[in-house]
Amino acid sequence: MTRLPLGATVRRDAGLYGYERALRRAGIEVVAGVDEAGRGACAGPLVAGAAILKPGRSGEIPGLADSKLLTEKARERCYAHVLKKAVSWSVVVIESDECDRLGMHVANVEALRRAVALLDVPPEYVLTDGFPVDGLGVPGLAMWKGDRVAACISAASVLAKVTRDRIMVELDREHPTYDFKTHKGYITDVHAEALTTYGPCPQHRMRFVNVRRAAGLEPLPDASPEESVPSVAELVETTSVGSASQHGRRGERGESA
């Protein structure tokens, strides 16, 4: 993790766009934010988004916030604004079988790297949510609850979550017994009951201990803590049905006009 450049002081009351403004004052114009959705889910893909917003008021997005704090309609509105106002954006999808092959932490880091690499405009600096990501090729800063304090990370989180929610709605049509459209692959009572009754489907992540238990398999000896016991926040996260069509399943990039 790197420090903010000299001169890039951020006031407490700077607001959601304060970090990007501070970096521009230090001479860094192109700042990307990157975030993921679905890390704690035991079914469905992991999705990462990256975004570079326009400088100044032209890049400000009405109502932008951490995607988990927004309603479905608010996320959809912010999503449309991000596509319109971003200098560059990208979305990467890591399917459940690749998450199993790599392990969730490695898959998460790889998704974030790919999202940054897909940006049409190379960033000079990258802000990440929660933990540092190496291998980006440019300096970066890991920010605690970054999707709540940095606009570009919030925009990336909206891209990732809206895309993933749309995918889970599509998967619900293929596997209606699990109610993916409601819980989006996170563990709820309804999802746990369906797993117990029907066992896992191909979209479930076989590294997660609850999925392996439902399949009659022993836990993996090298399972990471998150694959064994997802956090409380991840277990209780639920969303409602997305209304827009599904994104491409591997990776997508975009650049505003």
Image: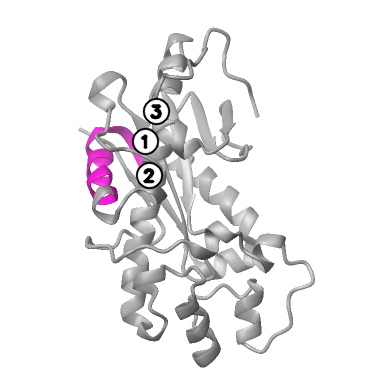
Q: Is residue 45 above or below residue 198?
A: above
Q: Is residue 2 above or below residue 146?
A: above
Q: Amino acid at mark 3?
A: Leu
For mark 3, what is the residue?
Answer: 16
Examine the rendering and report whether any part of residue 137 can be seen: no
Q: Earlier in the sequence, mark 2 or mark 3?
A: 3
Residue, x 22% and y 46% (percent of image)?
Answer: 77
Residue, x 66% and y 75% (percent of image)?
Answer: 209
Residue range of the region highlighted in magenta in the rendering: 75-89
Contact? badges 3 and 1 (CB < 8 Å): no
Q: Amino acid at mark 1?
A: Asp
Foreground label between 2 and 3: 3
In the drawing, what numbered circle is on residue 120? 1
Q: Main structural element of the magenta stretch: helix, strand or loop?
A: helix
For mark 2, what is the residue?
Answer: 90
Q: Earlier in the sequence, mark 2 or mark 1?
A: 2
Task: Find residue 1 and report its image quarter.
Answer: top right
Residue at the extreme right of the image, as rendered: 221
Q: Secondary structure at mark 3?
A: loop
The image's colouring method is: one colour
Residue, x 79% and y 72% (percent of image)?
Answer: 221
Q: Secondary structure at mark 2?
A: strand
Contact? badges 2 and 1 (CB < 8 Å): yes
In the drawing, what numbered circle is on residue 184? none
Report how far apart the C-alphas of labels 2 and 1 lie in the structure: 8 Å
* Image location of residue 177, percent across then percent down: 39, 86
Task: Find residue 196 and report its image quarter.
Answer: bottom right
Q: Is residue 79 magenta?
A: yes
Q: Is residue 173 above or below residue 182?
A: below
* Image location of residue 72, percent across then percent down: 28, 56
Foreground label between 3 and 1: 3
